Image: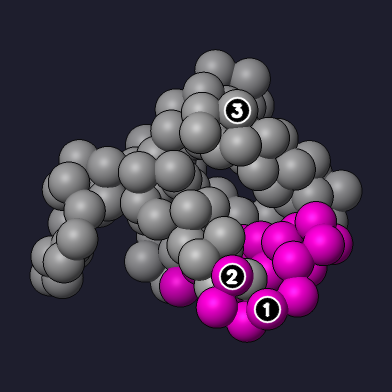
């Protein structure tokens, strides 16, 4: 852990971390699709959905998992295994848990102020998702 603040953040509820991580990743994806040259709102939305769906996020975190530091792996496992009262509407339950873990990692990195590491995870994830299309 980098400091006491980080320890409190990493030990917070994984669903809280996923809540903020979802928004941070969504914003990064929206920026990415705009920078790709799309300008029509309906095409922007359709392109963004391909990145933020549970199956895409699950694939990204599974591929990145082994290269994460041990403490980040523990966070991902804790978030993936955390019991949630909500059920996925349009996703496989296992993929949904992995996607929640992905979002929790992004949320942790954001709240801990680890922008460079967060940007690296996001850019690698976007590349993984694009490669799998």
Residue 1 x %, y %: 69, 44
SS state under label 2: helix
Badge 2: few (under 14), some or many (20 or more) residues near its Cα, within 10 Å?
few
Residues drawn in magenta: 19-43
User: What residue is rendered at 68% in x and 78% in y?
Assistant: 40
Residue 20 x %, y %: 54, 73
SS state under label 3: helix
User: What residue is rendered at 51% in x and 28% in y?
Assistant: 132
Q: Nearer the viewer, mark 2 or mark 3?
A: 2
Separation of marks 2 and 3 at Cα, in angstroms? 20 Å
Residue position marked by numbered label 3 in the rendering = 131
Q: Name which of mark 1 and mark 3 comes first in the sequence.
A: 1
User: What residue is rendered at 19% in x and 61% in y?
Assistant: 90
User: What residue is rendered at 55% in x and 78% in y?
Assistant: 42
Q: Decide if residue 5 is on the left or right side of residue 73.
A: right
How is the model colour-coded? one colour
Residue position marked by numbered label 2 in the rendering = 43
Name the image quarter holding residue 39: bottom right
| Residue 118 drawn in magenta | no
Name the image quarter holding residue 16: bottom left
Residue position marked by numbered label 1 in the rendering = 40
């Amino acid at each position: 852990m980098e400091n006491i603040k980080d320890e409190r953040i990493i030990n917070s509820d994984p669903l809280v971390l996923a809540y903020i991580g979802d928004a941070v990743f969504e914003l990064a994806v929206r920026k990415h699709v705009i920078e790709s040259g799309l300008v029509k709102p309906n095409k922007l939305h359709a392109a963004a959905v391909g990145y933020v769906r549970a199956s895409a996020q699950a694939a990204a975190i599974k591929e990145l998992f082994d290269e994460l530091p041990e403490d980040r792996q523990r966070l991902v496992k804790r978030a993936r295994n955390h019991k949630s009262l909500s059920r996925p509407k349009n996703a496989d339950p296992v993929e949904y848990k992995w996607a929640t873990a992905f979002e929790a990692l992004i949320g942790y990195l954001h709240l801990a102020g680890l922008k460079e590491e967060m940007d690296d995870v996001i850019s690698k994830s976007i590349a993984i998702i694009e490669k799998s299309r």
